[in-house]
Each structure stands twice: as structure tokens, then as C-alpha cells.
Amino acid sequence: MKILVTGVSGLVGNLIVRRLISQDHAVVGLLRDPQKAAALKNVIQLAKGDITVANLDPEIFQDVETVIHCAGLVGSGRGADADYMEINANGTRNLLDAVKKTAVKRFVFISTAAVYGTNMLKGNIDENTAYGTGNGYSKSKIAAENFIKESGIPYTILRPYWITGGGDRFFIPQVGNLLKNNAFYYIGNGDQQMSLSAVENISQAIALAAVHPKAINRIYNLADETIQIKQAVEIIANAIRVPLPTQKLSVVAAAFKSLLNQSPSNPARMGIDLFFPLWRTMTINANRIREELDWTPQTHWQDSLKQGVIEWAAGK
């Protein structure tokens, strides 16, 4: 099968490409600057295209049967609301408009559990949970999902939560930098639960959903396991050889401290993405993809997390 993947220079997109190749699929990588994926140029076809610009060249999609859309502005607080909408929502709509003019049979979208917004605070959220109140990032993903559902193109939407492992640019660096600067604190005892996913397992699940007949017009949460957040924090601390954190704050004190330390250059800065799972249990139920597609994570999250910490500490 010929599959087009956007965002192939990113953490998830890159691994999806390599997994698809190992399964003997022909892959086209679509990105604004093909040089960013130079390491893939000998194994896949690279196509230049900007999803934020309308009227993508239809030749890009020649003989493509499935599109896997990974490209986007990821995470909260990394751009203005308008940036999220332009890239994540309008970019998806532009891509869909181009796909409608082709023979593509399925559109696979990598969304996020952030679309559940404040409903995540209930814990164990399944795919039937309504969209919740959120921020610019989550709103842009909700808009993108709605464009997909309304497009008439057969789709599969995947909603992962807290992806970690080699190449992790969010969870590991955030926790690691706080630990290195003796600025990490628990809100309470660190017993709050979170859903964690190894990037290897996410790419495995996406590659499976892209070809599985039962995944048509389905939405799937993606998570390996529910853990206590202190389990992940302690693995990172041990891997970078710093003392285990002992500082504990009330939610009021933690919120006040977080608000005071929002400068990106401040080593004591705790981003909002990390603050919430430290404050409250935030978990998703990923039983549907296990039951319908027979998906089972192959890489243990602890092994992936340790490898990610090693790479981050080495500056890779």
C-alpha cells in the first residue's frame, strides 16, 4: 500500500515511517522543508508541501491510498491561539480539501486526549466523553476533528496522551530540568495517576489503525498503561543521577509558584501541561483499540522512558 505521512521529521511521524517501511508499504513524506527529513531520503519519497497553504499539488497524492496526518503545533503554551488554529485546524482542512480531489481511501489523524479538556479531571475518560473546555491547542484539535468528520472521507482519529521515549521534547526535558535545578515539587504525595505511552507503541498503534478494516470511522484513545506520576519522575531522577524529589506543595502554593515562574528561561518553570497531572489524576481509557484492533503495546514504558532520558541527557 502507498501511504502518505505528514510530519515525518517529528517524534511520532518519523517512527511511523520506519514502521510502515518495515511492513513493506511505500511511503511518501510530506513536509515544508524536505531537508529536515534528509535521513529518510533514501528510503521514502519526500514531497514538498505546506499544509497551511491551500491548493496542495494533487500530484503529491498519486496512487496514495491512505494519509496519516501527524504534522502540527504540539502541546500547550507553545504558540498563540491563532497559530494553533492556522496550523492544526486550517492546515488539516487544507489537507482534506486536497485529498477530496484524489483516490485516497482513508484519512488517519493524530489528535490528542487534550480535546477532552477539563473533563480529563474525571479520570478514566473513554472515547464517548464529550469535548471539554480547553486552551488554544485543544480547541484547534477539536476543530480539526470536526473538519475530518464532516469531510465525507473515511477516517480514523487517534487520541494519545503523554507520549514519551527517545526524542521526547516535553515530559522528559520538563521534569529533567526541574530535577537538575532542585526545583521539582509534587502537589500532594505524587500518587496521582496518569496515562503514559511509549512512542514505539504509539507508532505501532497508528500503523495498525491505518490499515485495519475495523478502524474505519472510529476514534481511539491511545495509552500503554496507567501509572503513578512519581514512578515516572523517579525513573528520570535515577537516570540523570540526582536525588529523588521530596518537596511537596499544596495546590494553592503550587499554582502561585507556577504563575510566578512562567518565563521560559526560568529553571523553576513548570509548564501547565505538567502542572495538571501533578495536581489531579488524569487518565484515559484505551480499551477500545485493544478490543477492536487487538492492539497490545510491545515496548514497556519504563524501557522507553529510560532510553529517552539517556538521549536527552546526552544532548541527542
Image (spheres, rainbow, N blue to C red):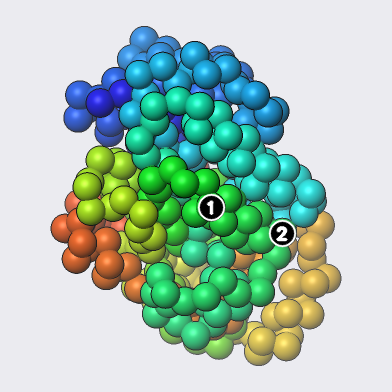
Name the image quarter holding residue 121.
Answer: bottom right
The answer to whether any part of residue 50 appears in the image is: yes
Residue 150's disc number: 1
Residue 218 location (% of width, % of height) = 35, 58
Residue at the spot 23% in from the left edge and 53% down from the top edge: 214
Residue at the spot 46% in from the left edge and 67% down from the top edge: 233
The answer to whether any part of residue 200 appears in the image is: no
Question: 10 Å neighbourhood of mark 2: few (<14), some, or many (≥20)?
Answer: some
Q: Which of 49 and 101 lies nearest the eye of the viewer?
A: 101
Residue 73 location (% of width, % of height) = 63, 44
Name the image quarter holding residue 20.
Answer: top left
Q: Which of 93 and 242 lies nearest the eye of the viewer?
A: 93
Q: Nearer the viewer, mark 1 or mark 2?
A: 1
Q: Residue flagged by tag 1: what amino acid is it?
A: Glu
Residue 33 location (% of width, % of height) = 60, 19
From the image, tell me which residue sits under label 2: 136
Residue 212 location (% of width, % of height) = 22, 46
Is 10 on the left-hand or right-hand side of 270? left
Q: In what element is the residue under mark 2? A: helix
